[in-house]
Amino acid sequence: CPRTLWVSGGTIAADGETNEVIENYIRESSVASTSGTLVDHPGRWAGMQSILRHVELLDFHNAPVSAISAGAGLRLRVQVELPDDIKTVHVSAGLHDSMGDRVASLSSLFQDSFEHGLQRFAVICEIPSVPLVPGRYFVWLWVEHGKSKVDVIEGAAGFEVIPSDFFGSSRLP
């Protein structure tokens, strides 16, 4: 479709060329769940240390996003602050659909080495193409020290995947 209407709250928010309207929708629909502090996050498991400090969902221009087109890229940035007694960790994320099922896992465990030696650092995961069906997704984060989880946060962030012509077939998935 060459022309798209974006209807919000019963009124037309945008009317124009499809790609422009979709870009405007994505830019305007950013919400607090796409980034924020994790220090007192209600999704942190009881008894966990507060190691995960901040999360951001970004596009490849480092702009915050709450929605991406199916097949678009996504950057996840997680800030970590380790207590003095922990020197080496692995940081992981799980992408969960609206039913709570994990659909993807991202982890520094997949790296050959993650010896950083820093107490404060950021982990950035770049996903060149997110091949997920349209819908709402939630990011779970966790930190492992040895074989133990030392911090876990369910629903640390969330984003929407909106339909797009991912396969170039002029059809939406």
Image: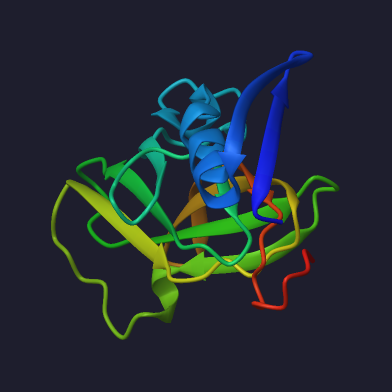
Residue at the far bottom: name it: 112
49 or 130, which is in the foreground?
Answer: 130
On screen, 128 above or below 149?
Answer: below
Whether residue 111 sits left or right of residue 137 in the image: it is: left
Q: Position of residue 11 (x, y in %)?
A: 73, 14
Q: Which residue does the image show at 74% across and 13% down from the upper left?
A: 9
Q: Quadrant of the C terminus?
A: bottom right
171 or 77, which is in the foreground?
Answer: 171
Q: Which residue does the image show at 58% across and 67% down from the upper left?
A: 71
Residue at the far right: name it: 99
Q: Quadrant of the N terminus?
A: bottom right
Q: Position of residue 77 (x, y in %)?
A: 35, 49
Whether residue 118 sits left or right of residue 159 in the image: it is: left
Whether residue 97 sits left or right of residue 2 in the image: it is: right
Q: Which residue does the image show at 63% across and 56% down from the upper left?
A: 95
Q: Which residue does the image show at 67% across and 78% down from the upper left?
A: 167
Residue 158 showing in the rendered view: no
Q: Position of residue 117 (x, y in %)?
A: 13, 60
52 or 36, which is in the foreground?
Answer: 36
Q: Position of residue 76 (x, y in %)?
A: 41, 52
